[in-house]
Amino acid sequence: MRMFGKAGKAAAVAAIAALALTACGRTDSGSSSSTAGGEAFPKDSMIGVALPQKTSENWVLAEKLFNDGLSSAGFKPDVQFANGGVSEQQNQISAMVTKGAKVIIVGAIDGAQLGTQLKQAKDSGATVIAYDRLLLNTENVDYYVAYDNFKVGELQGQALLDGMMAKKPSGPYNIELFAGSPDDANAKVFFDGAMSVLKPKIDDGTLKVVSGQTSFEQAVTQGWKAENAQRRADTLLTGSYGSASLDGVLSPNDTLARAVLTSVKAAGKPLPVVTGQDSEVESVKSIMAGEQYSTINKDTRKLVEHAITMVKDLQAGKELEINDKDSYNNGVKTVPAYLLEPQIVTVENVKTAYVDDPVLGPITK
Ligand code: BGC
């Protein structure tokens, strides 16, 4: 199963055609039907938000933003983390249905494991919104709101190339590839986006993956855990980089980027160009100190704000704003999406990228 961001559109359209899906091109107005006064449900309704594990700062921030934003709009938020894993998230979503949630927003741990609970949600009349991570292999998801994940990967791949060329004008460059957790639907999309840039350069010999580990399955980091990435980096350095230099590492996010940098430091090797994502405080500081090369700015405030706009529109019985109707095929249907644009951040633009950010603005001044 493959999902596509905008950049993979041609392939996406072909895949959709091959699957003979009918959802392509429609504007889905979800399950809500308007009641008197145009309102689909009362303004003080319960809204469920099921978040995954706290694997990066963006999720922690989302919790507060959802609680504050939904409350100030008059809704009753029920925001839950599932640090215990998939079965905890399944139970939380079922409980939200029982409590009468009118909209359930889901940032899935494993987007393919919630089929039963999402069916319960839809049967109860709730609208289901996939948040940041797509919900897979189910009819029972109405909308998707996220940063363009394929674009994130493309930006990471390009940053890796740019960073290495800035240090050493010509190749070949020795690199290693890291991917996110295989149960997270985003991980493969990030990797595919990056590989759309890197693969041609591997094929023409500009890039050399010295370990030979070029597939997604070989590159994954179970649970997005720093210790797993660090352990794999240790093994790669010992096994493949005796006297060879490591020029660059594709890392899908900041947590894993810092784990890789820790491993390289412990091995006493010069620091390679390492990519990231999420604009985590420690990584932004590392970029400013010239260690981590890049991150991705995916402002969580904007993403949560748009998710809450969707809830408000649903409540008011209004049609939702959708800017991508055909890229995100979840294996069963094409989910109408609202995608936000990610931004690459390096030392070059770190000051301007976060001027409006209450936490990062002061740090990068
Ligand atoms: C998010 C990333 C995050 C990762 C680990 C992904 O689904 O899109 O921003 O780094 O999860 O938490």
Image: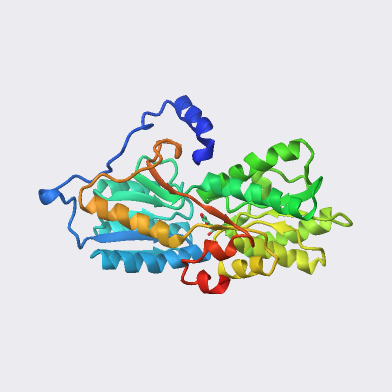
Number of marks drawn: 0
Of 62 and 204, the residue lying toward us: 204
Could you tell me which residue is drawn at 81 percent across and 66 percent down? 267
Most distant residue in the left direction = 36
The chosen color scheme is: rainbow
Most distant residue in the bottom direction = 362
Quadrant containing the C terminus is: bottom right
Could you tell me which residue is drawn at 75 percent across and 58 percent down? 272
Q: Where is residue 16 in the image (x, y as percent from the top left)?
A: 46, 30
Q: In this view, does 219 lie to the left or right of 131?
A: right
Instruction: Find residue 78 and report its image quarter.
Output: bottom left
Could you tell me which residue is drawn at 40 percent across and 66 percent down? 63
Q: In this view, does 231 lie to the left or right of 121?
A: right
Looking at the picture, does residue 338 appear above or below residue 60? above
Q: In this view, does 258 lie to the left or right of 91?
A: right
Q: In this view, does 170 lie to the left or right of 145?
A: right
Instruction: Find residue 91 and report its image quarter.
Output: bottom left
Q: Position of residue 320 (x, y in %)?
A: 29, 46
Q: Position of residue 82 (x, y in %)?
A: 44, 63
Q: Where is residue 105 in the image (x, y as percent from the top left)?
A: 36, 55
Task: Answer yes or no: is residue 55 visible.
Answer: no
Task: Answer yes or no: is residue 53 visible.
Answer: yes
Instruction: Find residue 201 and report its image quarter.
Output: top right
